[in-house]
Image (cartoon, rainbow, N blue to C red):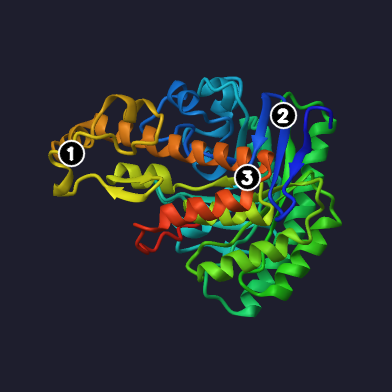
Amino acid sequence: MDDFEFRIVKKDKNSNARVGVIKTPHGEVNTPVFMPVGTQASVKTLSSEDLKDVGAKLILGNTYHLYLRPGHQLVEKAGGLHKFMSWNRPILTDSGGFQVFSLNSLTKTSEEGVRFQSHLDGSYHLFTPEKVIEIQHALGADIIMALDEPVFYPCSIQQAERANQLTLNWAKRCKLAHKELEDKGFKHRQVLFGIIQGSTYPELRKNSAEALMKLDFPGYAIGGLSLGEPKSTTLEMVDLCVSYIPEEKSRYLMGVGTPEDMVEAICLGIDMFDCVLPTRNARNASLFTRFGKLIIKNSEYADDFSPIDPECGCSVCRNYSRAYLRHLFNTGEVSALRLATIHSLYFYMDLMRMAKEAILSGNFLEWKNDFLKKYQSNQKEEGDNVGNN
């Protein structure tokens, strides 16, 4: 479609890293890109103006949560998600499949779709592929996702195989439903991405990727990772999936969001990321810096009047000290959550900027090694696998 295009600007000579541009009806996005998670039409503690200030170009909303509250019909009545939340840049909406399975212990999955209870009031609902597309068309995001069935690690090969087949069958129905709505002249111009599943089984990942490539989606997501498996396995599966995605297609790694994992995934050829990690950790006083994570509540920062990260250019680091931010957290000031979130999201945006510059200048691997050495020098393993799909 004319409103959507992905083009590669430059490829790294020594890895699969690349810089690209995604064209959407709401503007262009340079890749690699990190999408802040605005689950309920809001990135927690921040306004749309704050998001622009930290450099966000593309944000994520969630079908499951917006369907339940305030309802996709109300968002459609408001003119779509962009107008509802006063955000004039691109939006991607997840299908809600991950949330259905992770927030509801009593789900019933069949070829028809997935029946679930609302985590809000216990009411019963059915997500079919057609329903999920209908909801996302009403929300009006620029990029929408097919309904999939993620499986959680560890799982049997039989479970993963069954989920793969459902994901493929649902992808076909999503594509048909999307085309039917577009043919009717739907008001929002959107593109639909497919999602590769297969857990940590290489053969199933291969089968899922090959089958989905035949459906020729404009872009592809890699789902079902960062759910507790070893990080080496995560990267192995990413590398395998990327090998089956055509070079001219956008590649989106869902829910993988530690800085070191993203840098490694960029090296493998990933273009798009999302994760709750920077915002969730920030609200819990755990801040990202170029020198690893910093727990701002620690007593060692009580009289530390330096910035959170001396090399950071965000408004928080330019204006406030570690001691002040620690004081805000320890006194329960709401502003602490906002300032911490601004800093961590700026760090993520700046990480993407540095990666792009390194690829464009031809020294990506050198930059990657230098970044990881500095970042990991003070880093401790804290179980950060917090997949979003």
Task: For marks 2 and 3, give the CA distance.
Answer: 14 Å
Q: Secondary structure at mark 2?
A: strand
* Residue at 82% over, 53% down: 246
Within-10-Å neighbours for mark 3: few <14, some 14–19, many 20+: many
* 259 on left or right of 7: left
* 135 on left or right of 101: right
Where is mark 1, residue-wise?
A: 304
- Kindly report which numbered mark, 2 or 1, lies closer to the viewer in this rendering: 1
- Of residues 258 and 62, the one nearer the viewer is 258
Q: Secondary structure at mark 1?
A: loop
State the quadrant of the N terminus.
top right
* 137 on left or right of 100: right
The reply to whether discs 2 and 3 touch (Cβ–Cβ < 8 Å) is no
* Dot placed on the residue nearer the N-terminal end, 2 or 1: 2
State the quadrant of the C terminus.
bottom right
Where is mark 3, residue-wise?
A: 272
Image quadrant in which you'd find residue 58: top right
Q: Position of residue 2 (x, y in %)?
A: 84, 28
Where is mark 2, residue-wise?
A: 24
Task: For marks 2 and 1, give the CA distance.
Answer: 44 Å
* Residue at 13% over, 38% down: 303
Q: Position of residue 128 (x, y in %)?
A: 66, 51
Q: Secondary structure at mark 3?
A: strand
Q: Position of residue 137 (x, y in %)?
A: 68, 34
* Residue at 69% over, 74% down: 202
- Kindly report which numbered mark, 1 or 3, lies closer to the viewer in this rendering: 1
- The amino acid type, in three-letter code, at marker 2 is Thr
* Residue at 50% over, 36% down: 350
